[in-house]
Amino acid sequence: MSKLGEIGARLYRGDVAIDFVGRRKTWYLISLAILVVAIGALLLRPLNFGIEFRGGVEFNAQIANPSDHVKQVNDAVVGTGIEAAANPQVVSSGQSAIRVQTEPLTPDEANVVQEAIQDAGATEVSKASIGPTWGQAIANKALLGLTVFVVLVVLFIWAYFREWRMSVAAIVALAHDLLITVGVYSLAKFEVSPATITGFLTILGYSLYDTVVVFDKVRENTRGITASTRRTYAEGANLAVNQTLVRSINTSIAALLPVGAILYVGVFQLGSGPLKDLALALFVGMAAGTYSSIFIATPLLAQLKMREPAMQAQAKRVAARRSATERQATRAAAVSTPDVPVTAPSPRPTGATVATKTAPRPVSSATAKRTQPQRQPRSKRGKGR
Amino acid sequence: MATKTSRPGRTLALFLAVVLAMFAAAAAIGSWKPKLGLDLQGGTRITLQAKTDTGGGVTRAKLDEAVGIISSRVNGAGVAEAEVTTQGEDIIIVEIPGAGNKDLERTLGSTAQLRFRLVELVQGPPLPQPSAVPTTPPDTAGTSPAPNETASTPKGTSSPKTPSPATPSPTTTEPPVITAPTGEPSPSKNRAAARWFGKRTTPTPTADTASPTETPTTPAPTTPAPTTVPTTPGGTPGAPTTGGPPTALLPPDLEQIPDPLNWQPSAEWQQKFLAFRCPEAGAVAQEQDIPSQPLLACNEEGFKYLLGPAMIEGTQLDNATAELPQTGTEYVVSLDFNDEASEIFADITSAIASKTNPMTGQQEQFAIVLDTVVISDPVVDEPILTGQAQITGSEADPFTQDSASALANSLKYGALPLSFEIQQVTNEGPELASNQLQAGLIAGVIGLLLVVVYCLAYYRGLGLVVIASLLIAGLLVYASVLLLGWAYGFTLTLPGIAGLIVAVGITADSFIVYFERLRDEVRDGKTLRTSVETGWARARATIIAADAVTMLAALVLFIFAIGVVKGFAFALGLTTLIDVFVVFFFTKPMVTLLSRTKFFGQGHKWSGLDRQHLGMPPLRRSPRPVAGEA
């Protein structure tokens, strides 16, 4: 654990920097590949909508050793002779239940089937029947909820960041997460129920949460950037990702652990139902959300931002100042002057330059350890300012 | 930064006082067990969608009335503890804990059926020993006939809600029809029947015949006065179809009744009436209310009725209100029929006003039947020609405000052109429910443990703060669930539990955001004590933004989720709020306090803030100026 702490510290100081922003094309490609698979899956294997959306009757029979009784229950249901129940889907579900799904039945028919299942050895038969039009209504409402939420999120992002580029980046990340999650559902043939949709919406919130945290740091790092030649916007953004990386990993783990617990119980103990549907969507979506806030949202933001003339001009100034400093530094190294000018508070262009030039980095991280004692007083001075 | 130099102790004390107060409130309620949803305790949940027959929209007012109908149907079926709530514009949800009632579904799904029918036969509830002497003609009517009858009939004391029928064919277990006509009409002042009247308060020019001289409580003399029976040649009193005239052999189901006003029960119907038993309380009436057919029905007190074919439909009723006439002291229920019904009503009242039913010997009654339950069976003393009628209570049993309103509401329900479509029925048995509860709790315990272990491993000493914060948040959630359950009937469902568990992670995230910030500040070389404040200043904005997003999500989810997943959204929103509360008023002051201790302040190896753990080189010379005194 203290390893992670050390990494965290080095990431924070910029000793170690993963070039999230600079290598954006790599991340984009990876995401693109995943998205292509997801969309392809979605097109080839439509989502498996649950009975709540299709309409029909679902019976949940409590029965010991469910997998041994599937056929028996199936025969019992077919044996009722009810047309809508002629093709039941019977699967064992969890440790002690069998799930039976049929077409929509009348209340009386449902009672007959319920009794038939009971007679087949179930200790208890629960039932959920959903009218066909109702499923459509629920689906429409879910879609409406999704739309409203996306609009609200856009408004929220816009109001919070006051910066359309951040909004665009955050929304792209959201869409990315949602598509991946939906793609996983389609690939794995998981059932989509209202609980799943609830999970999707929660993911949107969570993914946004991650993005908010990273963007907050980006904003902090790039505050008053046009007046400074310390680092470019892209570098500031990259530093932000690195600085929040440990935090992102930690929060993701903390969030995924309970979801994982729900998923475990939902899949292995209950077998089906809202717990499983919710947890599955959350698990996939949260993981995707963490990924996208690091690998998609921030690089995209930096990319958009760097198109601004002001930012490009600033980047030129940074480059100019750096080459000047470098020259000065080589001279200074020869003369062994005690310190660089105070106006250049970034004595470690290491992490910062990484974005533009990867070459100096290894050198500097290697030297980092040696030079550290020197660095100590400097950073103190920097803080005091 | 109100607590900058901070009196964290004071904040903490205040916070703990709030927590204690919540628990005191919960203790005052007395129940420490959260209300469980149907999926965790077993029960039936029926989702109904109200639809107008006319195609118009379902208004809020209509929906509220519909809830009234559904409630009364559920109660009528004898289901205890049922809860009827609305959702959205046209959704009604009935939740019934415990074992299912299979008939309920059918009952709830039907349209409200309010019809006006003539009373042909009526009989009090069966007595323990039905060996009563046959044929005691109800001539004496009133309370006298048979002692056992008065004992059980609520005649004089009938509940105000449904004015009890006029001394319903007392005592006789024999068909009252057979001997009835001989009976002398009972003096109506003895009867506990409600009465129809023309509306007085709004006299209309055409109300001439309404004989407004009569006061409600002193009804017209009970002389048969059969002169008012213009169009009833076959229906004259004393012509009951005793025995088995051929007409009685018609299949009753499809009986053609050309003139409902003068329909006389055939022998077959009389037999049916005799055989008919009112459903037990809680059971659903088996009789189908077919408008064109006679109907066997009961009132709430167990009187059974044979009613003629429907003559006016509930939908022909424009309005019904309970009111206190300006001149009177007793409540009445006013009804406005539409034009078509007004004419029919005028014909009927003209025909039966002050008349005696030949079968029962009682004054003719024109009953109101809602969903096969007779909700009122007033007599008519005078023709009512305007379509504006009033029902007054009987002398023995006048309307109260409540009883009049209840009747008016029932009439309104019946007039409501709403039908209900059952959209979703879930019935979860107790075994499944307890499995789900168990699964939810296990998931919660596992999830919480994992987070606690992780936080301890990573944050060490600070991990204890995380655990304490989670514990406090958990206590707050628990108290809130108890209080909300008490105040708003909030129930904990399986998705709700899932929401609470997911929230564990989101709550822990807030602490992590703060702690990482704190550690970053320490890495920058600040003292812990300074870092606690500067780190907080920066983390605070992030935490608020992040929680606002979660809150937003929860809100949208709550609005758009249908059914049980609402519980998830609610739990998520609730815990997010509590998270903010805990972070601000517990975690932060706690960390401030702890930063003054030697253990944390000097970066003890296990504090989670030691230099090595933070990846900083250990200090050799001159220990850094560490947080002041402590």
Image (tube, coloured by chain):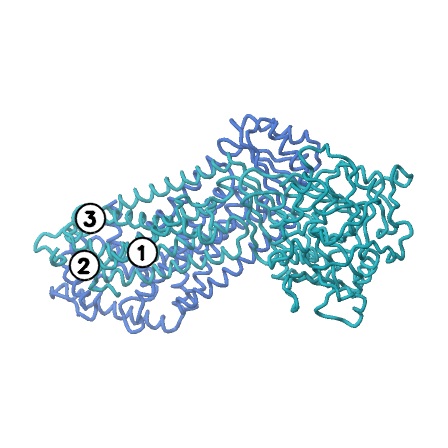
Residue toward you, A23 or B346: B346
Looking at the picture, how far across and down is residue B245, in whole percent? 91, 39
Image quadrant holding the N terminus of chain B, namely: bottom left
- Give the residue drawn at x 64%, y 28%: A75
Disc 3 packing (10 Å; few <14; some 14–19; many ≥20): many
Looking at the picture, how far across and down is residue B318, in whole percent? 72, 63
Residue B607 is tagged as 3
Disc 2 packing (10 Å; few <14; some 14–19; many ≥20): many
Please state which of the two labelled residues, at mark 1 or mark 2, is closer to the viewer.
1
Distance from label 1 to label 3 (Cα)? 29 Å
Subunit under mark 1: B
Determine whether, in the image, residue A239 is placed left or right of residue A197.
left
Determine whether, in the image, residue A220 is placed left or right of residue B419.
left
- Give the residue drawn at x 69%, y 62%: B334
Looking at the picture, how far across and down is residue B628, in whole percent? 12, 59
Query: What element does badge 1 sit on?
Result: helix
- Give the residue drawn at x 63%, y 64%: B329
Toward which corner of the image does residue B178 lie, by quadrant?
top right
Q: Earlier in the sequence, mark 3 or mark 2?
A: 2
Image quadrant holding the C terminus of chain B, namely: bottom left
Q: Residue furthest left?
A: B622
Residue toward you, B351 or A187: B351
What shade has chain B been given? cyan
Can you identify the residue that label 2 sits on?
B529
Dot 3 and dot 2 within a common chain: yes
Determine whether, in the image, residue B489 is placed left or right of residue B291.
left
Residue B372's place in the image compared with A213, above or below, is above
What shade has chain A been given? blue
Subunit under mark 2: B
Disc 1 packing (10 Å; few <14; some 14–19; many ≥20): few
Mark 1 and 2 residues: CB-CB less than 8 Å, in contact?
A: no
Residue B565's place in the image compared with A339, above or below, is above
